[in-house]
Image (cartoon, grey):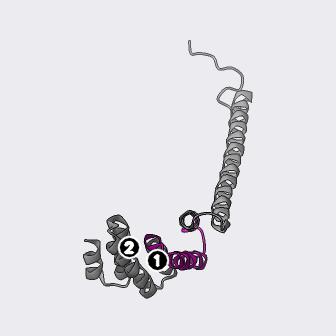
Amino acid sequence: HPARKSAGEGQGGDGDVLCVMNFIGSMRTNLVTLVLILVQSTAIAQTNLDSLRALWDDGTLADTVRFDALNEYVISIRYTANPDTLLRNAELLTAFAEKHGLKVRMGKALNMEGNAYFDKGDYDRAQERYGRSAAIFAEEGDVRSEARSLNGLGNSFSVKGDVARAIELYM
């Protein structure tokens, strides 16, 4: 004897409708949960950015703390902000580092200026900033940071079509 099917089974009966309704209900719950997580994450990220900016604005803090706070802020907006915004903040960091004699931090700021010019497509200015940054790091013996600056310099030569020079810088 073949097993008997209950009424409507396999033919779009009440069981199938209930299954679809449960699925839709769980999808709604998952979607609401996802939206709440995204909203909370965005709020936390904005709070962190606001906190970094507040540290920068606090003139009573040590110069290095203020620089590092704005630098973290600039790093965090690198891929979401307009390149002009990134450039303005990087130039602010460069001027601050120069004024306060923060040589290694000036190298970081110049590297960030290079990134901003690169993002704007101004590869000549990017090369100039990366080169100055690399020279500071070389003088200070910070080989990792020097390598990052040379990598940016190599990237700018590469996009301008000078692949041979880019390879020299990468090595």
SS label for mark 2:
helix
On screen, 38 above or below 83?
A: above
Q: Is residue 85 magenta?
A: yes
Q: Which of marks 1 and 2 precedes in the sequence? A: 1
Residue holding disc 2: 149
Kindly identify which numbered label has been placed on residue 80: none
Is 161 situated left or right of 5 in this image?
left
On screen, 61 above or below 133?
A: above
Please report contact status of discs 2 and 1: CB closer than 8 Å, yes or no.
yes
Residue 62 drawn at (x, y percent): 58, 64
Q: Quadrant of residue 18?
A: top right
Span shown in magenta: 76-105
Residue 123 drawn at (x, y percent): 43, 84
Residue 12 drawn at (x, y percent): 70, 33
* Residue drawn at 56 percent across, 62 percent down: 65
Q: Amino acid at mark 1?
A: Leu
Residue holding disc 1: 110
Is 149 situated left or right of 5 in this image?
left
